[in-house]
Image: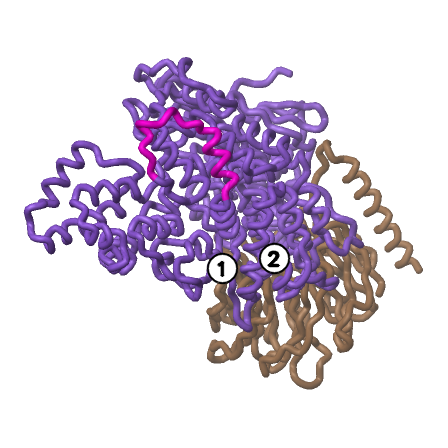
Chain colours: A purple, B brown
Amino acid sequence: MDTPPTGTPSKTSGDEPIDFKNDLIPMFTKLGCNAGKCHGSAIGRGGFKLSLYGGTPEADYDEIVRKLGGRRVNLVDPASSLVFLKPAEIVEHGGGAVIVDDDLNAQTLTKWIAQGARYIENRQLIRVDVTPNRYIASGIADETPLKVIAHYDDGVSRDVTYLTKFVAEDPSAVQLGSNPITAQGMRAGRHIIIARYSTEVIPIELIVPHLKPVRQLVSEPRHNFIDEEVFASLSDLRLPVSPNIPDHDFMRRVALDLTGRMPAYQRVEDEPPMDREAVIDGLLASEEFIEFYTLKFAELLRVQSKGDKNTVTTTPQAARGFHNWLAEQLRNGVGYDQIAREIITATGDTTHYGPATFYTAVEDARLQTEFATEVFLGSRMKCANCHNHPLDHWTQDDFHGLTAIFAKLTRSKVIRLNPVGKNIHPATGKAALMKIPGGDFLPIETKDGRGALAEWLTDRKNPYFAKAIVNRLWKSLMGRGLVEPVDDFRATNPATHPALLDRLADDFVQHGYDMRHTLKVIAMSSSYGRSSLPVDGNESDNRFYSHMVQKPLSPEVLADAISDVLGVASRYGDEAFGTRAVSLRDGAIQSESLDVLGRCDRTKSCEGTPSPIGPLAQKLHLLNGNLLNARIGAPSGRLERLIQSKNPPLTIVRVFYEYALNRPPNENEVAALKRWIDPDKPADQQRDALEDFVWSIVTCNEFITNH
Amino acid sequence: MNNQIQCRLVQYAFCIFMLLWLSGVGTLVAQEPPITDLVFSPDGKSLISCSQRGIRIYSWPHLKLQKEKIALTGNLHCLAFSPDGTLLAVGGGNPSDDGSVAIYKWPSCESQFSLSSNDDSVVSLGWRNKTQLVAASLDRSLILWDLKTQNAVQTFLGHSRGVTAACVLKSGEIVSAGHDHSVRVWDTESGELIRNMNQHSKPIHAISACPYSTGRPLVATAAADRSIRFWQPTIGRMMRYVRLESEPLDIAWIDKSKMVASCTDGQVRVVDFENVLVSRKIPAIQAWAYAISVHPSDGSIAVAGSNGQIQRIEL
């Protein structure tokens, strides 16, 4: 079908009446009327409330045409309608003049009123195509026209570019032209533009390559499909890659990533090349892996004792029980789909059945919906509590339908069905019907909708479940999610490597939702083995894996690493002395050190990327706190033992380097340390210098990050 | 019997119109502005409506258009006869710009004068006596006008959003309600707020003082929270409330224990105040029924709303 040129008004056949849903609502969106900062806010503005981005056109029609005695439209004199006078600023309007009184928007609006201001939907929107949805520019000056075609259920397709709102995710990086509508990248990189027409939001990927000459990527080793996808992206962007790391660096990296522990130092210079696959297999089979990944899942599932007489309680026994259950699943290699099914459908006494504790982590069914969708779909659905999600396809019915499923449970020590439990849908004021998100309502006689929910969730065709978990596994090794934040999957937050995410998820499903398999595939890729040191031309890259992202050690791993290096164990709450932080089975166990290091408090999602000892309190704690100062020179500590054994200072230095950094000091470092720790100085001064050295090594960036 | 036949004819005509209207989706069919208020003439022989087209006077019970009059400019929202039935007040205005009250002689419809002091439309009127009239406006104010001097006697300020409804108690106090969800009682002489009642959870559309109560004054309010609440405003007490399936837009008393409500689903609901229940639902018009009025003597009601529809209903 012929379509008008980009940027011209869309045309309908003949004298079709103005279509309220397909013409007028997109126009309001384009003009910004129904944005969150204007009439689309939760309470509207100036007494006039529209649904956010036109998510509920029927309600908008009532608001515009029917409320207040219909005073906003004047059917006798359309040009006197308030809905026209305000945006044209003929009467005072807080939002200023958003239409000119004779422009196309004004004509459309007054024509619609003259036609009777009726709710007309000539056809149903099926889909929207944006051309291009991915564009690799030849350079900064390259400007590409954008075109949006809407397809409807009656076979009509039409150009709706004029009615589409385009927003650059980073306005400083993309310039949008208005007539015709074009996009131009202002600096090298990958930029996202969101096109919004009606209820559809479509991301447009604009890639502006770097102009510097790039090393030939063809010669780089490709170990598996991950490397194919990563290199394709790097090639588009003309980003050079950093070299691969030597075996001893790889050992430290992979051990920390898979077990949360520093490896024992080995003098690899004398060893044959490491069999990296064997190392990875060994780590994945270790008890330390189970311990570390149980901690990760315990944080994700907010496992901790909590509560008082006014709140939903998780007993310490229940928290430990859930932790132990998670560890057991990992130990037995249970598929993630099976783990999710058991958690979702759990019922019973939380003291005796760990997964039931999933339902005491939050206070009510609505929070349970937010929590469950963050965990299992990687999606923040809470916007849909109050209105259809403005940046995704979740509707208010999805949110409250899922909440209706969770509302059928009691939340106490024993999780059981509650036949009278209900969730009042705020839009209707009535009990919401149980519904699978994005799917069907459940039969009204359904007593427990969790079985259907678990089936849908773990269905091989579910577009979110596998992606959400492989994205988290990817982040745990690569430092940044393909979708970031990892709990914010949505249409307007596309993956940096969509094809890679698809392939990882497919591979995960094909291998029985086996997390160890996916971790191994990632760890075996050459992309994982890349140095964190940038080379000329990839310094600014922080998402395309041209070099490894430096990952701050998690608080538990850092606390354990400090204990290991200093040779002094920590005490956590009432746990036995020497218990490792990563093995704590209850997130509520008291520990000032872990709190200061920024451990997840497990009352909310902890999936933001923590900065490496960023906050001032953490730095002060490391400078002056007991975590280090009281332990560096402890009588039973490593430093004291080495001194008492009459080791020369440089030997002591070498030992700490090997424990902390998994390498010997290099020549420059040895030279500097020789100047600092003068062997001719008195013993007490040497001790002070050594203590300062140990302090500096456990606070340096090389130690507190996995790099 | 003739009345019933004519009523039937009006209903048939309405149905045919709706069928044409519905089948006309995709073609252009004229749309009438909504009727926003109705009032019966004191003798019950006429029904007066107002809309963006002005005032229309229909014969009752035949609903035959007798007279059409352009009144004020912009939107018309409310009508009220003076206690002695000699004057008809019409409220309205240009949205977000001005609000006025026009006074006409009845039954001649001769224009007397206009009272204009508001920054937004006047949407509700209540006569205090034959020379004083209170006008509620979306500019958040209530003004008590003296018709002899054509001056504002008192301005009542306190509502945080537009005032949508007002009535005057027999004891003289003014009761108002608005978009701020509140029902307020005002001292007419001093202009001071006496009581503020906040049980509604959404904007209030209508208020009606019960003309049949013999003890303490009784007032009903209808709101977007789908409730009708009954109050003893002079002591600040909410007595009871009824939750409806649909949002009530206007209410009117039938007798001391029953009232009727016109709703957004186009139905009329008969509400039993004593037993706090909806005793009857009557389909009336398509879409929103903005206005309802009880005939002074023949036991019927008039309902009007979207697309200029008017319906007579025998109770």
Give yes or no for residue A281 being in the magenta stretch.
yes
| Residue plotted at (55% across, 66% down) | A315
Q: Nearer the viewer, residue A651 or A286?
A: A651
Residue A486 sits above or below residue A176 on the image = below
Chain identity of mark 2:
A
Q: Quadrant of the C terminus of chain A?
A: top left
Q: Quadrant of the N terminus of chain A?
A: top right
Q: Which residue is mark 2?
A: A354
- The CA distance from mark 1 to mark 2 is 12 Å
Residue A143 got which mark?
Answer: none
Residue bounds of the magenta highlight: A265-286
| Residue plotted at (54% across, 26% down) | A499
Residue B76 appears in the picture as rendered = no
First of labels 1, 2 by sequence position: 2
Task: Residue B51: give x, y in percent of width and height.
Answer: 65, 52
Q: Which residue is mark 1?
A: A586
Task: Residue B153: give x, y in percent of width and height.
Answer: 48, 73
Residue found at the very far bottom of the displayed protein? B215
- For label 2, the SS is helix
Toward which corner of the image does residue A537 lie, by quadrant?
top left
Toward which corner of the image does residue B216 lie, by quadrant?
bottom right
Horizontal relation, residue A258 to residue B54: left or right: left
Residue A195 sits above or below residue B180 on the image = above
Residue found at the very far right of the displayed protein? B1
Give a yes or no on whether discs 1 and 2 share a subunit: yes
What kind of residue is marked 1? Answer: Asp
Horizontal relation, residue A86 to residue A417: left or right: left
Toward which corner of the image does residue A445 lie, by quadrant?
bottom right
Chain identity of mark 1:
A
Residue B308 sits above or below residue A31 on the image = below
| Residue plotted at (54% across, 52% down) | A301
| Residue plotted at (61% across, 26% down) | A150
